[in-house]
Amino acid sequence: MIKHSGWVDLQVNGQIGVDFSSAALDRDGFLRAAEAVLTSGTALFLPTVITGSMAMYRRNLRLIADAVESAGLEKEIPGIHLEGPFLAPEPGYIGCHDPKFVQKPSPENFDALFDAACGKIKLLTLAASADSGDLIEHAVKLGVTVSVGHHNATPESLGFAARHGATALTHLGNGVPNFLPRHRNAIFAGLSADGLTAMAIADGHHLPAEVLKCFVRCKGAAKLVIVSDASPAAGLPPGRYNVLGNDAILEASGRLYNPEKQCLVGSASTLSKCMEFLAALELLSEKELVAVGRDNALALIGMKQPGGAVGKL
């Protein structure tokens, strides 16, 4: 077992049947899910709200912000990860998100969401595109870390996003179609973008072991952050579930997928399980594992202390 002082997970969509993007989310359910995450080996996490209606955003973003504050969990849950709605709507790139709720990337559209969340958005995932520059700059000025994903990225579009202030790649290797051009594709573009930190899901299903090895070799421990992308099915037994608006199957192996879209629907793993899988591949030292599972995530969202020391979790 890896020695650590608590993992940091920047992408948690839900837990134990609780969906952070559901219209049925309530305060008690959110806090039960948060407790499950925080007792699983994760010391700090960002609840993730995916692409949805404005009514859902106004309700859930405020609910989460209020629940965190009232429960005194600001240290453990310092903000929200908004994954969408500024994504590429094309099949494959949109993943399990609902394309009908995709919005144009604009500072005005983002401000409506930022205000609904009481300013608690810590991380924004959007598609790198020719019209995303103004929004990226605007979000960064508000103190939001911007990551790019769910897009048909090219080296040029990623360079454009980075110049405007984007610093990361959301679940690199996922949020793309099952079949891609052999060389010019979003995965290779992301691996070759030296200035962008890659977030990667190490549950053993989103990325095969040999792909994770390539990620480690390309990005190195300094430019890699492991996330769980945990779905509401995390912590539940195998079966059929409605997950993030998808009719999904959770297999005994832990693979969670939509059989109609033939896409994964988040993971059913905690970050501790992801880190165990990665450690078993023997690609990284113990110090490097702590970096990709904790320190790099803190630095990415601006929580690394001056002088390089990581604040006590």
Image (spheres, rainbow, N blue to C red):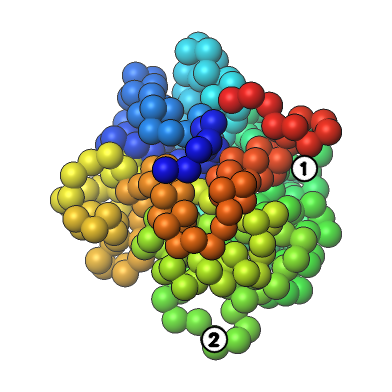
Q: Position of residue 54 (x, y in %)?
A: 50, 39
Query: Given the image, on which type of amino acid does mark 2 rest?
Result: Pro
Secondary element under disc 1, as helix, strand or loop, is: helix
Q: Determine whether, in the image, residue 186 is placed left or right of residue 310.
A: left
The 10 Å Cα crowd at callout 1, few under 14, some 14 to 19, many 20 or more, is some
Q: Position of residue 162 (x, y in %)?
A: 78, 59
The 10 Å Cα crowd at callout 2, few under 14, some 14 to 19, many 20 or more, is few
Q: Position of residue 109 (x, y in %)?
A: 65, 43
Q: Position of residue 150 (x, y in %)?
A: 55, 62
Look at 54% across and 86% down and name the residue there: 181
Query: Given the image, on which type of amino acid does mark 1 rest?
Result: Val
Q: Which residue is mark 1?
A: 140
Cα distance between the residues tagged 1 and 2: 32 Å
* Between discs 1 and 2, the one toward the N terminus: 1
Compared with 288, 174 (above or below) is below
Q: Quadrant of the C terminus?
A: top right
Quadrant housing residue 156 = bottom right
Q: Determine whether, in the image, residue 233 is placed left or right of residue 163.
A: left
Residue 185 visible in the snapshot: yes
Q: Nearer the viewer, residue 38 or 178?
A: 38
Compared with 28, 202 (above or below) is below
Compared with 79, 158 (above or below) is below
Look at 34% across and 23% down and name the residue there: 32
Q: Which residue is mark 2?
A: 181
Q: Quadrant of the N terminus?
A: top left
